[in-house]
Image (cartoon, helix red, strand yellow):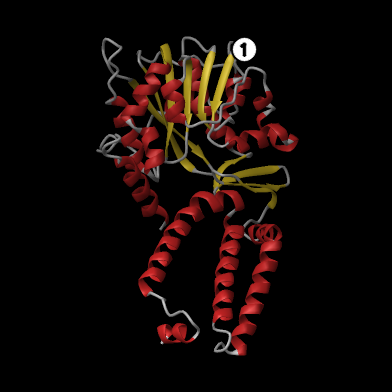
């Protein structure tokens, strides 16, 4: 039927295979461009509306070609749909802001797309929450219970504290800078916009006491693996606060190969601390990270392996959350810092943090490597069991 109509309007050389080939090629280009180029630049809602307008444009060309055969009702529907799509595209920012505001009980004070993720900040009275990709990253009411455990035990046990590397969350810098011995802090974050926001907005910068504007900080916006491979410096403490390893791109930052790279960036006796997620919600994933670190060979050392201490903390926003501390030398007894540096961590809570209940205790788990990537499966299975 279509071929006969095309012949009647003068397309005698029309060939189905050419049209199908162009259709498949266009679908391939669009499927790659949409997530990699269009969404990072325009945001999901604007990108969807742009593609909708493009499709309506193709429909309009088809209506023009078949103008003698298309019913007027079809033309009317197309005109109405195109008009609505164009208005939606024109008002896409307001439309998205309205839609997002309905998702949160709190006031949305910031909503922004970057090439890496969507950033949202909400506020209720004096309480501020940050969400990346609509996943909560911190709540100002309890973030101290998240940022203190990876920082203070490592800083207290490290023989030197002059140079500190933070891979991921820059909020830990506030806790690190409480130590007067610190001379250089290097936060490494892939998304420059997050650090820009927490430097430039006074209300958000106040949450970390202006730490990201401290002259001792050098913020680098690059890939953590690339930095670990090429960094010329060594660090006394390395704090790894990266997103959950739910895909291969993130899982590689929890492998034996990556931890071996980090060992080369530690000074003698330096301390590494990692947050591998929840030992309750993703129990096997947590112990997989412990197994991975313990099994990482350190050929530059005589005994050739890490000395490891796993521990955990309760954070109301996240539930039970785990950490793993490691050093090439045996970890010494923790000498607690001044009380004004911490709101809740005490010698008693530190001892309790190293005790795991029966539902969080160690279980068999395979180590994570670039070849196996067992961790991503453990992580997804654990969270799915609890929340799906």
Q: Quadrant of residue 142?
A: top right
Query: Where is the C terminus found, in terms of image quarters?
Result: bottom left
x, y percent for residue 108:
69, 51
Tell me, yes or no, if residue 361 can be seen here: yes
x, y percent for residue 140:
63, 39
How many other residues sit within 10 Å of disc 1, few (<14), some (14-19) or many (≥20)?
few
Q: Quadrant of residue 303?
A: top left
Q: Judge left or right: residue 224 versus residue 339.
A: left
Above or below: residue 62 compared with residue 175: below
Residue at 56% from the left image edge and 63% from the top image edge: 51
Query: Where is the N terminus found, in terms of image quarters?
Result: bottom left
Tell me, yes or no, if residue 134 can be seen here: no
Residue with the mark numbered 1: 180
Residue at 61% from the left image edge and 88% from the top image edge: 73
Above or below: residue 70 compared with residue 339: below
- Disc 1, SS: loop
Residue at 36% from the left image edge and 54% from the top image edge: 385
Above or below: residue 166 compared with residue 15: above
For the image, the number of numbered tags is: 1
């Amino acid at each position: 039927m279509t071929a006969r109509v095309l012949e009647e309007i003068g397309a005698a050389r029309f060939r189905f295979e050419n049209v199908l080939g162009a259709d498949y090629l266009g679908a391939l280009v669009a499927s790659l461009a949409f997530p990699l180029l269009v969404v990072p630049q325009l945001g999901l809602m604007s990108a969807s509306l742009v593609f909708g307008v493009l499709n309506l444009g193709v429909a309009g060309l088809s209506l023009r070609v078949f103008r003698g055969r298309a019913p007027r009702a079809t033309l009317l529907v197309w005109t109405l749909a195109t008009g609505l799509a164009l208005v939606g595209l024109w008002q896409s920012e307001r439309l998205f802001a309205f839609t997002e505001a309905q998702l949160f009980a709190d006031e949305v004070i910031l909503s922004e797309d970057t090439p890496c993720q969507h950033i949202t900040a909400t506020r209720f009275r004096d309480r501020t929450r940050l969400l990346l990709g609509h996943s909560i990253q911190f709540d100002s009411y309890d973030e101290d219970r998240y940022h203190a455990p990876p920082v203070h035990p490592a800083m207290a046990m490290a023989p030197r504290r002059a140079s500190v590397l933070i891979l991921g969350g820059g909020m830990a810098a506030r806790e690190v800078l409480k130590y007067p011995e610190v001379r250089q802090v290097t936060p490494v974050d892939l998304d420059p916009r997050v650090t820009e926001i927490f430097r430039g907005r006074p209300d958000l910068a106040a949450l970390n006491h202006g730490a990201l504007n401290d002259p001792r900080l050098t913020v680098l916006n690059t890939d953590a693996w690339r930095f670990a491979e090429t960094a010329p410096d060594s660090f006394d403490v390395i704090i790894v606060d990266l997103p959950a390893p739910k895909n291969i791109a993130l899982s590689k930052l929890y492998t034996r190969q990556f931890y071996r790279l980090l060992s080369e960036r530690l000074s003698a006796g330096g301390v590494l601390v990692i947050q591998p997620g929840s030992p309750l919600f993703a129990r096997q994933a947590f112990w997989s990270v412990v197994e991975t670190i313990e099994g990482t060979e350190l050929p530059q050392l005589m005994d050739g392996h890490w000395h490891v201490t796993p521990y955990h903390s309760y954070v109301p926003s996240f539930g039970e959350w785990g950490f793993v501390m490691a050093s090439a030398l045996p970890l010494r007894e923790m000498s607690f810092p001044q009380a004004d540096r911490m709101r809740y961590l005490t010698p008693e809570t530190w001892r309790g943090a190293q005790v795991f209940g029966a539902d969080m205790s160690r279980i068999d788990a395979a180590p994570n490597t670039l070849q196996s990537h067992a961790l991503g499966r453990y992580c997804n299975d654990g969270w799915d069991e609890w929340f799906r």
